Amino acid sequence: MRLLTHNMLSSNIKGVEKGFPLRIEAEKVVEKPVEMNADFLKKMFEKVEWKAFVEASRSMGYSNLPEEVDPAMLESDEFLSRFHHALLELHLEEGALVCPETGRRFPVNKGIPNMLLHEDEV
């Protein structure tokens, strides 16, 4: 699971008001090279919840992103490279996503998060 995906997931358990961001418990992280596309990154930058993104990347062992950002940083090749790496090349292969409100763990196996709810959570 890429951090791009993580940044769009939230806990949908009945009654949960603060289901985002899901905390990452990483057991296995792999890097999979992807060709960089600056236009795509610039479009995705607007949609990414930055604080959650930085926290998620750090939980996967990558700490080369700044705490604060502004759109002018998109003109820097170094920033784009770091953003690209965290967003698209880091993959959570094994671990869990944890609801910030309930502590419910959603397993991630072979890179696929299982977000299915139990009957009593719907």
Image (cartoon, grey):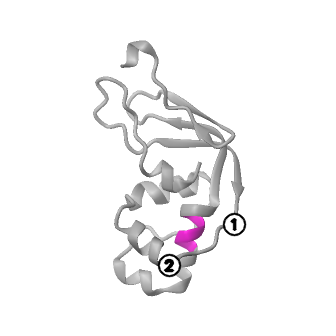
Q: Residue at x 45, y 77 (%)?
A: 39
Q: Position of residue 50 (x, y in %)?
A: 40, 62
Question: How many discs mark residues in the rendered view?
Answer: 2
Q: Which amino acid type corresponds to the residue marked 1 in the rendered image?
A: Pro
Local SS, label 2: helix
Whether residue 92 is visible, yes or no, is yes
Residue 33 badge: 1
Q: Judge from the rendering whether residue 51 lies leftward or rightward of residue 109; answer left or right.
A: left
The crowding category of the residue bearing disc 2, from other C-alpha atoms within 10 Å (few below 14, some 14 to 19, many at least 20), is some
Q: What span is in magenta?
A: 82-86
Residue 38 badge: 2
Q: Position of residue 110 (x, y in %)?
A: 69, 40
The crowding category of the residue bearing disc 1, from other C-alpha atoms within 10 Å (few below 14, some 14 to 19, many at least 20), is few
Q: How far separated are the C-alphas under marks 1 and 2? A: 15 Å
Along the line of sight, the residue nearer the viewer: 78 or 88: 88
Q: Residue at x 56, y 57 (%)?
A: 58
Q: Which amino acid type corresponds to the residue marked 2 in the rendered image?
A: Ala
